[in-house]
Amino acid sequence: MTNHQDFRKERDSAAVVILGAGVAGLTLGNLLQAAGVECVVLERATRDHVQTRARAGFLAPGTVRVLERHGLADGLRRRGLPHGTCEFRTADGAFRLDYSRLGRREQHTVYPQQDLVTDLLGHFLDGGGEVRFETTALGVEETDGPRPTVTVRDAEDRPGRWRARYVAGCDGRHGAARDSLPPTARRHRRDHGVTWLGLLAEAPPSLDAVGYALHERGFAGHMARTPEVTRYYLQCERGLAADAWSEERIWDELDERLYAPKLGPLLRGPIVQRGIIALESDVVEPLRHGSLLLAGDAAGLLSPTAAKGANLAVLEAELLAEALVEDLVHGDPGPLERYSQRCLRNIWRAQEFSHWMVQLLHAPSESGASGASGEEASYHAALRASRIEALRTSRPHQDWFAENYLGL
Ligand code: PHB
């Protein structure tokens, strides 16, 4: 078998070729680099794009511990904000869960995902890491042998090939890794039938909590980012264009769904980013196919309802890095053989909780205004009200929520 050091002698080869410069790929890259395993990161987008793309921003305590353990937490320790409260708003009023005093009594660190990506990238490059931006992986070949290759097109549209011992597919749900899976790969998939308009506003947060509003016009969410920037979500019709609504319409809609007339006005500001998010979930099983390994969104996509995507990505990257180092440096293939199973336990826990959140926050799509009967819609509305009531009044429910909300 080829030793991981041998790859240094060849052009366009590395012991591990990592597809994707997101949270999973860059965490993995940093950990491999620290262990002396040569790797390269191939990223389809520009550096600017990966550093500015707005995503969730809630890091669980376990995620922070992993990043701290590997010296990757300087930025989030300096600029991240502790967060431990969420507020549910319904037509009946509002209540708060101080989840930092429930369950395991821990809290989130709010740190925008694009800032985490910027930190991880800076750390990797400062340590001598190589990232090829604007390099599109087209496919991964020969994954059933010890020399997989990645076919690419570079920034100048030139074709090329990267040779590796292992390929880590951290390139998301539409990446080359998923396209290159053998027919034996199983895909579990759920379309929740719900769509969000994701918004980034240059406006201070309007409440000192995550806000989840259940309204007959649809869900609205208020998520802190920084003292100057707030993330909002508005449930919308599938097919709506991201730019269909004027800023005024968006703020009016947020006001109404967050019950601003009753519970206090929202601080308005320019909307600087918007995107449509179809709430979908999927899992690829197993996560290892010969010399191709999946992590992050490529392994499993979570609906964004519980903001767990980046958290899962960090945990998977750590497990994968440890397993690759054991194999490549110490010659022990055992951890890599167990990688998929170890991740899948976390993945399905996170899937289950995210799915529960989807059902808590939205009417099921098939019983919306355009779907099934009014009787069914009112049945589901009453179920959700009962769920919310249990969360408002029952300490065991609250502890369960806090533990799942914060943990994996
Ligand atoms: C977010 O930070 O965008 C976020 C936070 C909590 C959620 C969903 C999204 O439940």
Image (tube, rainbow, N blue to C red):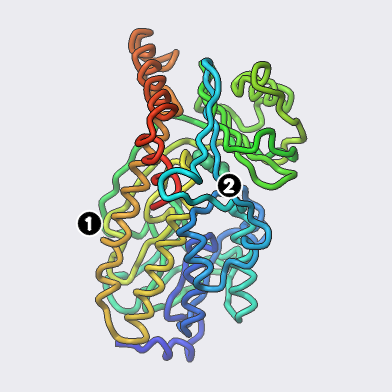
| Residue 311 shows in this picture | yes
**Type of amino acid at the residue the image marks with label 2:** His
Which mark is in front, 2 or 1? 2
Nearer to us in this view, 171 or 309: 309
Picture quarter containing residue 327? bottom left
Q: Please give the residue where the numbered disc 2 appears in the rendered image.
A: 83
**Mark 1 residue crowding within 10 angstroms, few (<14) / some (14–19) / many (20+):** few
Residue beneath the point at 62% across and 19% down: 259
> Residue at horizontal 29%, vertical 62%?
342
Horizontal and vertical percent for residue 358? 42, 33
In the picture, the disc for residue 138 is none
Real-space CA distance between mark 2 and mark 1, rounded to the nearest whole angstrom: 42 Å
- Is the residue 268 above or below the residue 131 in the image? above
How far across and how far down the image is residue 231, in percent? 63, 39
Q: Residue at left 41%, top 20%?
A: 385
Could you tell me residue 21's position as x and y percent?
A: 54, 63
Determine which of the numbered discs, if any, sits on residue 184 in the image: 1
Picture coordinates of residue 388, whole percent (x, y)? 42, 25
For mark 2, give the secondary structure. Answer: strand
* Residue 109 shown left or right of residue 6 in the figure: right
Q: Note whether residue 235 is visible.
A: no
Q: Quadrant of the N terminus?
A: bottom left
Label located before the other in sequence (2 or 1)? 2
